[in-house]
Every structure is written in C-alpha cells, then in structure tokens.
Amino acid sequence: MNVSVDPNSGFCFGVVFAIRVAEEELEKSGKLYCLGDIVHNNREVERLSSKGLTIINHEELKLIKNSKVLIRAHGEPPETYKIALENNLELIDASCPVVLKLQNRIRLGFEEMQQNNGQIVIYGKEGHAEVNGLVGQTLSKAIIVNCENDLDKIDYLKPVRFFSQTTQPIMGFKKLIKGIEKKYELAGNNKPDFIPYNTICSQVSHKEPRLKKFASEHDVILFVSGKKSSNGLFLYEVCRSINPRTYFISVKDDIKKEWFADEYSVGVCGATSTPMWLMEEIAETVRSF
C-alpha cells in the first residue's frame, strides 16, 4: 500500500507564526493565556496546553489582570484591546498580517460608508473569531452574509462595500457578487455604488485546486481536520467532490481498516489548521496495517 502526505497541506503562515510565538513565550515563562483555541485542532491545542498554554474565553479575559495573553491569528475586535488596557494585560499579538490588513481596509471602508449612508457587507461565518474581529471595526454594524438567502439583509438603494473573511471559498464569493448585482437590478438601481474586494487569503484560494489534483491521484483520501474548523469542513467537501472515497478524521483512532486494501494508494491531507506532524502520524498508522 502506497501512503503519501500532501506537501501543500498543513498550517498556513499565520498559524505557524502564532504557534511559534506561543512556544517561545512558554519556553521563557512556562505559562501563557490564549484567547480562544490557538488553532482549530484539538491535538495541537492539547500539545501546547501540556507546555503551559491556558485557553480562555472573552468573559474570562475580563477577570484576568496583570498577565500575558496571546492574540491568535484570527485577530480581535477593538474591545479586546480596551479590556487589556483596563486590566493591565500584556497582549502578545500574533494576529495574521493578512487579517490585520483586512481589518484596516474594513475600518476605512466603514468610515467611507458612514459618510455616504452606505453598508459594509462581509462574506463569512457568523460567530467565527475572525469575523467577530472584522465586524468590530464597524461598531458591529456590518452585515454578515454566508449564502444567497442572506442577501435580503442588504438595502439595494444604498452603497455597498463587500469584503470576505480570509478563509472563505473563492467560488462562493463570486457567486454572492453576482447575486448582489442581480438584487440591485431587481431593485431598479441601475447604477449601484457597489464595490467588491477579494480579500480571501491566496494560500487558501490556491489550496482548493491543489487538493483537487491530490485527491484525484489516490484511491482513498484521509482528510485530517478538527471538527470546529470551517476551513477544514469546506476543504473536505472539495476532496470528496473529486474522490468519493474521502474520509474525514481528526485522530488516528478514527481510522477504520476496512477502508483499505493492499492495492490501494492512500493520500493524507488536511486543513490550514492541521499540523503536519499529525498527518504524518496518520500516515504511519495506515502504513502499519
């Protein structure tokens, strides 16, 4: 049985940076708070927790004082920085530079729309950590859309600046652009002030075609991801659309021997939140069969 790991899978540079920053701090002090899971992968969170990383939520943040707190790659809204000042917290900011750039663009877009009675619309998953940080740049006034049914939230007699969460699928973004343009037409607004900005991370948008190619090259695909990763759930469906013998797993105990036979070629791949060491562990488990 030939088992190979996709070299293009694994952590994006934003997650790599956040984990490196956490490890460096833990080596020095042995203790560090992290606001939310540092990455949507339980095994990696467990590994760092064993080194002294403590995951907290936003309510717990309000109760902590005089401590160091890591801001993960997803970024945070302005309110988090305000709490840090009030509680004398030292924030170790590991926000992804792509996310920080997007936050700034949305903040500037919001200032423009405030002056022109317009709207900021964000393609993303409501409640997602990154989206919360983006919406925070607009005094929580941004409109979040995730599918065509959500487009009815928009007022098509007003200007729109349209952005995307960095990890959303490019085809979904393009589909919603067409949907918004159609809604403007139906509203009788033939000269809409509508500007879409493709703010999807290039590492994410390039991953989809690469995964499709990888999935087509193997008889069985094991897609490794945490169940809380929206990026993982999307990329799993990408693989399954090409290879129906694609299985979603989070740990090696999820593997079933009946998925394989000696003649099969097995490919192991994962999300941007999946560590390479975990995919290698999965591959070694299959090889042991």
Image (cartoon, rainbow, N blue to C red):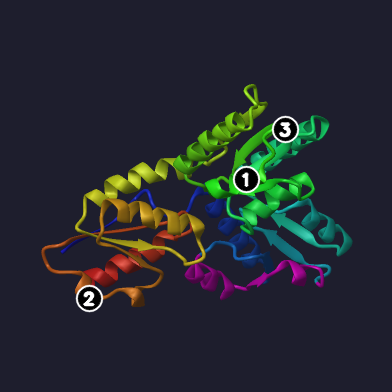
- The verdict on residue 51 being magenta is yes
x and y percentages locating residue 188 in the rendered image:
63, 28
According to the image, label 3 marks what residue? Answer: 158
Query: In the structure shown, which secondary structural element does the residue marked by tag 3 occupy?
Result: loop
Query: How many numbered tags mark residues here?
Result: 3
Magenta stretch, residue numbers: 41-63
Disc 1 residue crowd, few under 14, some 14–19, many 20+, Cα 10 Å: few
- Asked whether the residues under the numbered discs 2 and 3 touch, taking CB atoms below 8 Å apart as contact, a structural biologist would say no
Residue lying furthest right: 86
According to the image, label 1 marks what residue? Answer: 152
Disc 2 residue crowd, few under 14, some 14–19, many 20+, Cα 10 Å: few
Foreground label between 2 and 1: 1
Spatial CA distance of label 2 from label 1 is 47 Å
Q: Is residue 87 above or below residue 109?
A: below
Spatial CA distance of label 2 from label 3 is 57 Å
Judge left or right: residue 88 versus residue 234. right
Disc 3 residue crowd, few under 14, some 14–19, many 20+, Cα 10 Å: some
Q: Quadrant of the N terminus?
A: bottom left
